[in-house]
Image: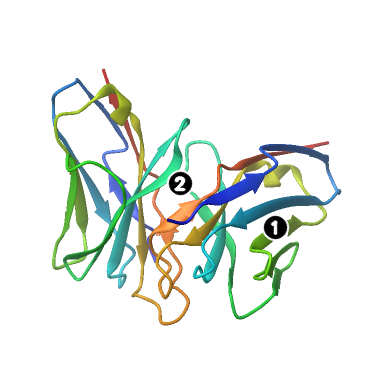
Amino acid sequence: GENVEQHPSTLSVQEGDSAVIKCTYSDSASNYFPWYKQELGKGPQLIIDIRSNVGEKKDQRIAVTLNKTAKHFSLHITETQPEDSAVYFCAANGNPGTASKLTFGTGTRLQVTL
Amino acid sequence: KAGVTQTPRYLIKTRGQQVTLSCSPISGHRSVSWYQQTPGQGLQFLFEYFSETQRNKGNFPGRFSGRQFSNSRSEMNVSTLELGDSALYLCASSSSPGQGGGDTQYFGPGTRLTVL
């Protein structure tokens, strides 16, 4: 089955700096890669996703890049703000053709300090 | 639109009991997936239902089961509870199976199950 590795497990940045979280996946058939943000006491919230037919996607301060050959994808957050502090999860679909059966990384706890 | 709702939000049970959790998807969404989240194992896929049929299943024992109703609402059941079943159980809904690449899953707030 699919295996997703995520690094780093914790990340501390100063407000205004950039944050980068990296993930690798094992199943070359995976074709959908979402990123979720989870705040304390809440369910994961989708922040951005990318499909295998594109290499990069951007939404304001958030961007995701995908390297299918290397089976890597990364989340980039620019101009970080205190409200960006949360746990971030990457995921890959374990059932190509649908977004279901997601395999998640182990999460990155991002702390944005003033 | 209202988001995914899950009831109850918190639940305490003892070993050997059984439990039923409920999930109401976003209006118009027909696919419901369930995930278990624990500190040790992270987020793990349990199963997915679409049009009242189980479409995908994760690697969990048969004590974990689910169903979906004609209005797309879903329930999951865990029988003979074990201490290790203590977890946050998350439900996610999506509008329909995507073609060639996926359909976004939206998560509810989860049900926190504690087994004593």
Comparing B69 with A70, the one in front is A70
- Label 2, residues with CA under 10 Å away: few <14, some 14-19, many ≥20: many
User: Where is residue B112, by image quadrant?
Assistant: top left
Residue displayed at 83% across by 43% down: A15
Mark 1 belongs to chain: A
Residue B50: x %, y % from top left: 24, 68
* Residue A53 appears left or right of A19: left
Residue A109: x %, y % from top left: 65, 38
* 2 or 1: mark nearer the eye: 1
Residue behind mark 2: A43
Mark 2 belongs to chain: A
Residue A69: x %, y % from top left: 67, 70
* In the image, residue B49 above or below residue A86: below
Residue kind at label 1, given as amino acid type: Leu
Residue displayed at 14% across by 35% down: B79
Position of the C terminus of chain B, as image quadrant, is top left
CA–CA distance in space, label 2 to label 1: 19 Å
Residue B62: x %, y % from top left: 17, 43
In the image as oriented, which residue stretches furthest toward the top?
A: B116
Residue displayed at 49% across by 49% down: A44
* Residue B89 appears left or right of B73: right
Residue kind at label 2, given as amino acid type: Gly
Residue behind mark 1: A75
Q: Secondary structure at mark 1?
A: strand
Q: Are marks 2 and 1 on the same chain?
A: yes
